[in-house]
Amino acid sequence: MATGQEVLAHYQITIDQAQQFILANIKQPDVIFDTAEDFGITTQHLSDITGYSTNIISGFFGSFGLDTVELDDIRILFNSELDNGFSLIGFNNRSDVLSTVSLSSLVKADVEISDYSDFFKPVFSYQTDDGLYTPDELGVPGNSVPATEASIESLVYGTLIKVYAGLDDSELTVLKDFSHNAANIDEYRALLTDALGDPAIRSDEELANLIADETVALINEFWYGDVMVNGTLDLSLLGLAGIA
């Protein structure tokens, strides 16, 4: 993850300019907060820039009813706690109808081309500066991957294949009908884990159509839905476990 200084450098802003902006708006915390959110400046970045701890910064904004969790949800794939769901995340190594090329063709037929392309881009432009997406930037533990749209596209399809290959129609219905709230996240996760315990019996063609339909839904919800998220998979069955 880039430091606050590196993020400012990307936007061609000096530390002094940033500090002056903060001081000039210290009595208007919403202006500081909204600007930080627009540019992907996290609580840690603000700490790097100001020298104050993240706890002090969170407390400052919190006293005005502003939650810095919103500043920190900048990860490209997931901004939710996946627990044992991390094992399901991986590149798409399938061929034929389940290949990334084949799946993308199915999806592109039902969405705006620009919506498709932009869906697989980074949340903030500074995340590509070093040519790699780090685990912190992805929201997934493991190794860094090349900072390309193709990397995210393959990870999205690879992950969705693993998830939906383990869910039959009745399990999907139960999971999609689950009413999420702050009190039942653990119940949902347990339900999902149990449902994924046995593979579903599907042909590759059936799975491909299911994945394509789900990706179309994810893209449309990402751009036009009521729930605002940054991660491409935050609204997936895996992501919903953590954004209730």
Image (cartoon, rainbow, N blue to C red):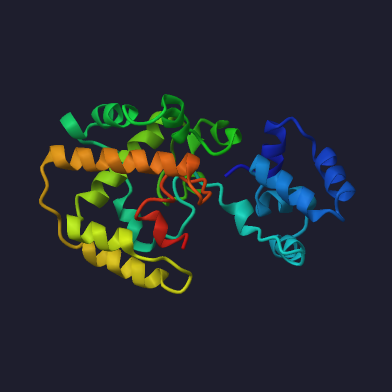
Q: Nearer the viewer, residue 42 or 63?
A: 63
Q: Residue at x 36, y 55 (%)?
A: 238
Rendered image quadrant of residue 4: top right
**Who's the residue at 46% across and 68% down the image?**
181
- Taking the image as drawn, is residue 96 in sight? yes
The residue lying toward the viewer, choosing from 199 and 51, is: 199
Task: From this view, report whether residue 155 is shown above or below residue 183.
Answer: above
Q: Is residue 173 left or right of residue 19?
A: left
| Residue nearer the viewer, 40 or 240 | 240
Q: Position of residue 108 (x, y in %)?
A: 34, 28
Please give the count of numbered marks on the rendered protein.
0
Tell me the quarter of the image containing the N terminus: top right
The x and y percentages for residue 122 are 51, 36
- 194 relative position to 115: left or right: left
> In the image, 209: left or right of 131?
left
In the image, is residue 183 above or below residue 175? below
| Left-right relation of 166 to 111 | left
Residue 172: where, in percent of width, then height?
A: 24, 57
